[in-house]
Image (tube, rainbow, N blue to C red):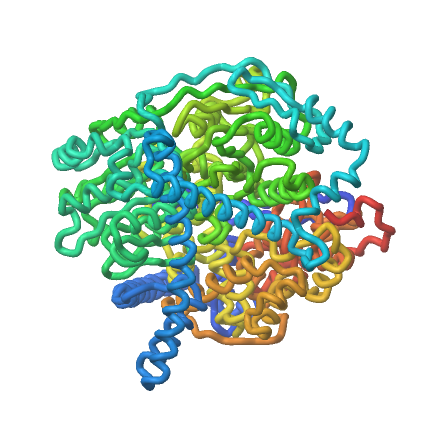
Amino acid sequence: MPNDAAALLKRYNKTAKVIDDSDSDDQVVTIKKSKSVSKKHMRKRKHSESDDDQDLPQASSVKETTGYEELDIIEKEEEDDIRERDALDQRIRLRNNLSQKKVMSFRDAKEREEAQKRLNVLSGTAKDQREIVKKMREESRKKYLPKRKEDKLYETRRYIEETEKYFNEEELTERERNELEYKKTVLKFADQFEDAGKIVKQKRYHLPDASKKIIDEPEEEERRMGDARRWEEEQLHSAMFKLGAKDRKADELDILLEDLKVDFTEAVTMSGENEEKKPVLSALEKKKLSLAETRKTLPVYSFRDEFLEAVADNQVLIVVAETGSGKTTQLPQYLYEAGYCKDGKRIGCTQPRRVAAMSVATRVAEEVGTKLGHEVGYTIRFEDCTSEKTRIKYMTDGMLLRELLNEPDLGTYSVMMIDEAHERTLHTDILFGLVKDIAKFRPDLKLLISSATLDADKFSQFFDDANIFKIPGRRFPVDIFYTKAPEADPLKAAETTVLQIHLTQGLPGDILVFLTGQEEIESMEEALNERIKHLGKRIKQLIVVPVYANLPSELQQKIFEPTPSDARKVVLATNIAETSVTIDGISYVIDPGFVKQNSYDSRSGVEHLQIVTVSKAAANQRAGRAGRTGPGKCFRLYTPHAYKNELDDQPIPEIQRTNLANVILMLLTLGIDDVVHFDYLDPPPNETVAAALEHLFALGALNHKGILTKLGRRMAEFPCDPAMSKMIVMAEKYGCTSEIISIASMLSVNAAIFYRPKNQIIHADTARKGFWSPAGDHITLLHVYERWKEANYSVQWCVDNFVQYRTLKRARDIRDQLEALLEKVEIALTSNDDPTPIRKAIASGFFYNIAALDKTGAYKTVRNRHTVQIHPHSSLFEDRPRWVIYHQLMATTKEYMREVIEVESSWINEVAPHYYKTFHLDEMAKKKMPKSMGKSKNDLERD
């Protein structure tokens, strides 16, 4: 019996929040409950969960029973619910075991359709088979020709370099000299052809004809520039800075640099470690090496035998290795080669981020020599790329938690590696306690805790003084520069610094810029590409490559492609590039000093995604990325004083600053009832645990004793927030599961649906308003998805309506998985065009997020009287309905409600009578609305 959880719930349920109906006071009133009130509360909850959906006043027949009889009825209902929950749990696990008998899990619906077409053709006529074989040959040739071209050019270039280096012209025969001249000519024409292709690519709107050559355009541009060239040259020289390391003379450059330079102080050098005397291989040279030779160049290779011996001697091992040492890609392979996958067992490796799991699995599959998804695969949220053949499996830490629901003992794994443990994500911290217990009753399971920092003693103590295995890294010296004064606009300063480095520092040497998220990355990418387009051929090529979680995997792989010898690559990344992903060729790091992280106030129940300063540990990790392949430079866009006095030594663990409702639901589903005294590495505040239990109880996932209900077991199967999971489950009652999972998938992509090009803002806004619904933003999202579906998932439709195709494609993949999960938890797929039941289903999950318009014309949350505003991009921004429910709050200059939908107060009585007082909701509904008022310019302004 989870007594501690029940005690915390009891403490929260001693008071009930209601809303004062007086016009003079808008404060929340707290009323103590008597025993009779408590019994009424139970009766209300009982009738609210009944299938006939009766109103609360009809519960008078229960009053005729005695108190003991009523308690007996409640106890019997709870026992029946637990039996149904356990039966459901067994059926879910059985279905999950059957679903593992698959050959391959496709990543999206389109891939499934293509595979089915191929299967149909191969089982068809001989003519059909010849057509598909012909098509496959054409596709193979298209992929082969570019690779063959690259290989031949590389061989030609190497032949010329080596011949000129080792032989004088007199030592060559006439035939050899002719061959050398011929190869030089071929290489020259190939380079000219490549340059011409770049020009055409940059000038896509230009259609060349016989009267005008493309190569003449720069001369024409120079004639138009006139005296402006001299001004540009002065701006260029004023923007130059010298750092004492091979600064280039830029007299020949003619660049437009409108911004003032960023002034940096003298460098502070971060010393290197285990520097190698031999020359560092370029990315292109590494690519030409065999995979086996490349693996041998990694620092971890020298410790292969010692590592395998340490694993054999210890059940739990703490592995400390620098980022880039090869621990993530090589250690699982060493274990695989040593026979740890016998008898069908697997080696698992968790990653804190999706991008890392996908990119690492792709690389390891290539090294093992298998197709991704066969012997090597990965699983991330809403995407499974594994099969029953998979032996090395990479996954996000959240996905391993979900696997524990169906396999609590990790029976299919012989080794589990918790990688990047130093990042202390919420799911990783929960996994520490779970795998520690599993290891105690599974002595055959090997457990590796991998960290990129030297602070491993804490992990060792937590795992009963486990041994530490240290793999020395290879790091070159890094010169660190600080700004002389704080930067008012760090994003603009980062953009300017990129151009300063590109103009003054020689090649090779790529740039890595750390930004807070997708919005900043896309903004800077657009700004840099505008600059590059404007400057044209007057500077060397600068390739801008973004990387963030929601970027499609094929685009994420571009950061690993070798940079051409006459170009520079600038990678715009989130903090994923600190430790999770290693990018070769980085010589310069730009660190604005900020990161985006979740914070949660358990008292108000408000969760924010805030931009905060990085910790000193994270700043040092960022600087170290510049010293991976050679000496580097790190430009910190903050002062030395800020580093010493404003940055924390270590980041606050996520478990101590976020909402725990989701992970506590997972723990309860795993059978861990005592979540208060769970074995945490750093225990969360009791207030946060209590708030999470209260939230789950209000959603119906727990009964009044803190025991998981059948509804809670169903909710736990969906990889969503508990409120969204409740919305999906309750859609069955309202007959609209198809529409609700479409809405849930659109809310889950965490990316912008619409885009607004600067030169087409009016057209984009008009197209967006065409999807608006008077019911609210959730129905707007549903309209977007349904119309895209009607257009047969067309890319052109997205372009015409200013909708992000990649975002909708991701939403379609998520919807496919949610539909499969509905079947898994025994919920039928139903459809209903009426927006009223759809809005009721949304309210049943998000009733916590209800806000009402008060007499002053401002919205206040009903739960804690917090003042909020409808976001200007919402379809309800001007309508301002009386009652609304929002999906999330976003804090900028104000507290904005995002994704808002209109509801009625009577619906709240229907979906959450146990949480809000009927009388006071009715009283609020009777209050006078504010008179219509003109809106200020700021209110009408669209963000």
Residue 687 to residue 505: above or below: below
Q: Which residue is drawn at 16% across and 47% down?
A: 340
Residue situated in front as seen by the camera: 60 or 840: 840
In the rendered view, would you say 508 is above or below 864? above
Looking at the image, is 125 positioned above or below residue 262? below
The image position of residue 391, as x and y in percent, is 23, 53
Q: Which of 282 and 431 is in front in this view?
A: 282
Residue 896, position in %: x, y? 67, 46
Residue at x 61%, y 61% (from the top left corner) = 908
Out of 683 and 823, give the one closest to the viewer.
Answer: 823
Q: Is residue 82 above or below residue 132?
A: above
Of all residues, the one furthest to the bottom in this rendering is 125
Q: In this view, does 440 lie to the left or right of 616?
A: left
- Would you say 543 lies left or right of 411 here? right
Residue for point 58% across, 42% down: 521
**Residue 209 point in image, percent of width and height:** 69, 59
Expressed as whole percent of the image width and height from the top left, the position of residue 733 reads 50, 71
